[in-house]
Image (spheres, rainbow, N blue to C red):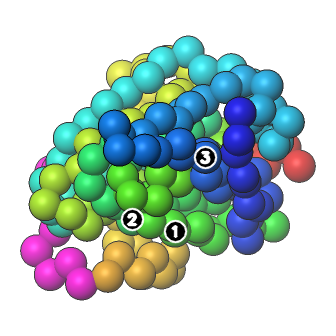
């Protein structure tokens, strides 16, 4: 498998770019191959795949699970998003910092969001089909989150004057208000 990867400003958050093979018929790429991704630093296995479709200026997140933490390998099948991973691990040297990258059907990039991070995205195109692999199952009673526009985190969401945000996400707390027992531990 042809794959390039980059480390980011936060250790463990990885950016992958699979090689696209195209001709006049269309294109082909491998979206995941365990050995190639493990060789690039992504350890572990995936147990669940998810797909969501959202309209322009939808913001989903910042979500995480505490007892059943999920690492996520995220990508966009159609459209474009600004994808964000926020380190919320108490005791982490990068606590409260984030990585934000554009993922699109054109650049075919993938972001690995490790366990212990809150995750969100904003749709930049008319619609976006957002695909992600998870290292643990969705656990409905284990849902937590941080307010998507927490000023202390400082995510530049771009020009989003009328965001489409769920009522649940609008009720999330600022990171500084989340009780410590509801934050994952940094394990260095």
The image shows residue 144 at horizontal and vertical percentages of: 43, 41
Pointer 2: what residue? 82
- Tag count: 3
As drawn, the residue found furthest toward the right would be: 188
* Residues at marks 2 and 1 touching, judged by CB atoms closer than 8 Å: yes
Please tell me which residue lies in front, 115 or 36: 36
Q: Secondary structure at mark 2?
A: strand
Pointer 1 local density, CA inside 10 Å: few below 14, some 14–19, many at least 20: some
Magenta residues? 159-168
Pointer 3 local density, CA inside 10 Å: few below 14, some 14–19, many at least 20: some
Q: Is residue 116 left or right of residue 35?
A: left
Q: Secondary structure at mark 1?
A: strand
Please tell me which residue lies in front, 109 or 30: 30
Please tell me which residue lies in front, 31 or 112: 31
State which tag comes first along the sequence, 3 or 1. 3
Please give the label number shown on residue 19.
3
Please give the label number shown on residue 100.
1
Residue at point 61% right, 46% down? Answer: 19
Residue 68: say if magenta. Answer: no
Residue at point 53% right, 42% down? Answer: 21
Q: Quadrant of residue 149?
A: bottom left
Q: Label 3 vs label 1: CA separation?
A: 22 Å
């Amino acid at each position: 498998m042809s794959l390039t990867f980059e480390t980011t400003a936060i250790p463990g958050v990885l950016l992958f770019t699979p090689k696209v093979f195209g001709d006049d018929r269309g294109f082909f790429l491998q979206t995941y191959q365990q050995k190639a991704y493990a060789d690039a630093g992504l350890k572990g296995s995936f147990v669940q795949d998810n797909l969501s479709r959202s309209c322009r200026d939808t913001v989903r997140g910042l979500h995480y699970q505490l007892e059943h933490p999920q690492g996520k390998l995220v990508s966009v099948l159609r459209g474009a998003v600004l994808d964000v991973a926020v380190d919320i691990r108490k005791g982490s040297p990068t606590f409260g910092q984030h990585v934000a990258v554009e993922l699109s059907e054109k650049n075919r990039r993938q972001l690995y969001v490790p366990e212990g991070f809150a995750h969100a995205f904003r749709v930049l195109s008319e619609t976006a089909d957002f695909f992600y692999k998870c290292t643990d199952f969705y656990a409905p009673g284990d849902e937590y989150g941080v307010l998507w526009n927490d000023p202390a985190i400082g995510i530049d969401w771009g020009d989003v004057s009328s965001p489409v945000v769920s009522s649940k996400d609008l009720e999330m707390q600022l990171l500084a208000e989340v009780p410590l027992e509801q934050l994952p531990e940094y394990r260095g």
